[in-house]
Image (cartoon, rainbow, N blue to C red):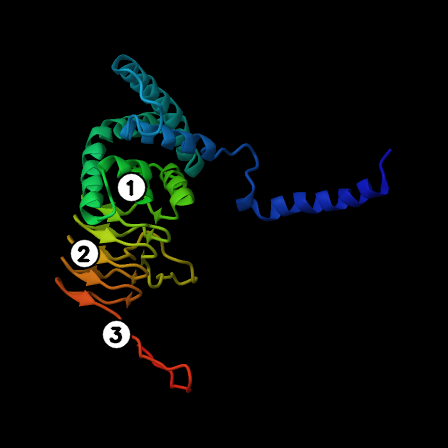
Amino acid sequence: MPTENDEKLDDRIAAILASYRKHTGLALLEGRCLPSRETVWAVVEDLLRILFPGFLEVASSPEDFADRTEARVRSIAQRLRVEIECGLRFEAECTADTSIRAEQATLELVDAIPAVRDVLASDVAAAYEGDPAARSLEEIVLAYPGLQAIAVYRMAHVLYASGVPIVPRVMTEYAHSRTGIDIHPGATIGRNFFIDHGTGVVIGETCVIGNGVKIYQGVTLGAQSFPRDERGRVIKGTKRHPDIEDGVTVYSGATILGPIRIGRGAIIGGNVWVTKNVPPETRIVVRPGQQVQVDRPVQDYQI
C-alpha cells in the first residue's frame, strides 16, 4: 500500500520527468545514441599500451608479445569503429556511407600508429633533454603526465583531422581527467614538444604549435574573445587561439590569448598576460615586484 512518503515522491518524480522534456540537451530520449565514454576510455588505455608496449602491463615473451599486439589492435579497431559510427549517426542522420566512413577513420588511426610513435619518440627526447630531474627515457614514459596527455592528444588528433565528431574530444578528456592537462584534439602540435609538470595547462582548438616548444604548468593558450552573429550567438569555426613558433618557451602561469603569433625562440616569462604578437627571440617578463616593509604602510604597486 502506498505510503504518504510515496505520494510525496510521486510529484517530485513527475517534476524530474518534466525537466527532461524541458531541457532536451541534458537527456538522451527517443533512442538517440552517443558514443560510450566508458568504451572510448578503454580504447584509449589500449592505444597507450600499443604506443608504449610493456609499460602499462606485465612484459611477455616475444612470441606472446606479437600475438597480444595483434589481438589488441583488432579489438581496438572493432570497438572504435562502433563508437565512431555512433558519433557520426548522432551528429547527422544516418546515411548509406556512415559505416564506410567509420571504417575508414578507424583504419586511418591504425595506419597512423607508427608515425605517431616516431613523433612521440621526439617528445620523450625533448622531455629528457629539457628536465634535469629526468634519469631515463623509461622514467618519462612511465611517470610524466605531460607525455601521457600528449600521446592521447596525438591519437585523438588523427581522428579529428579525419572529421570524426565527439570521439576525439572524449579521448582527450581521458587525459585531462588524469593529468589536469587540457589539449583540444583540434590543436596542431609539432615535434619535440615538452609539457613540464603540466597541471592546469590549456591548449585551445585552433592553436598551432611549432617544433621544440616547451611549456610549464598553469599555461593557457586560449581565446581572448568570441565573435558573435547578429543574434548574439558565438560564431564557431573561427581562428581564436595563438600560434606558437619553433623553439618557444612558456613559463608557468603565463596566459596567451587570441589569434596572435609568438615568434620563433621567444621566451614568455611566468605569470604574464599576452594579447599581442611577440617578435622572434624576444623575452616577455613581469617587472620585479616592489620590496616592502611590513612595519609601515606602502602604496599599491602595479606591474
Amino acid beneath label 3: Arg
Q: Tell me: residue 256, above or below residue 82.
A: below
Earlier-in-chain disc, 1 versus 2: 1
Residue 190: in sight, yes or no? no
Element under disc 1:
helix
Q: Nearer the viewer, mark 1 or mark 2?
A: 1
Find disc 2 in the rendering and name its residue: 248
Amino acid type indicated by mark 1: Leu
Q: Position of residue 299 (x, y in %)?
A: 38, 86
Disc 2 secondary structure class: loop
Q: How many marks?
A: 3
CA separation in Å, label 1 and label 3? 32 Å
Q: Is residue 70 left or right of residue 118?
A: right
Q: Quadrant of residue 145?
A: top left
Residue bearing mark 3: 287
Residue neighbourhood size for the residue with mark 1, other residues' Cα within 10 Å, grouped as few (<14), some (14–19), many (≥20)? many
Quarter of the figure that contains the C terminus = bottom left
Q: Quadrant of residue 44?
A: top left
Q: Against 155, is 293 above or below?
A: below
Per the image, the residue denoted by label 1 is 147
Query: Mark 1 near mark 2, Cβ–Cβ under 8 Å?
Result: no
Cα–Cα gap, marks 2 and 3: 20 Å
**Of the pair 301 and 163, the residue shown nearer to us:** 301
| Above or below: residue 190 compared with residue 115 | below
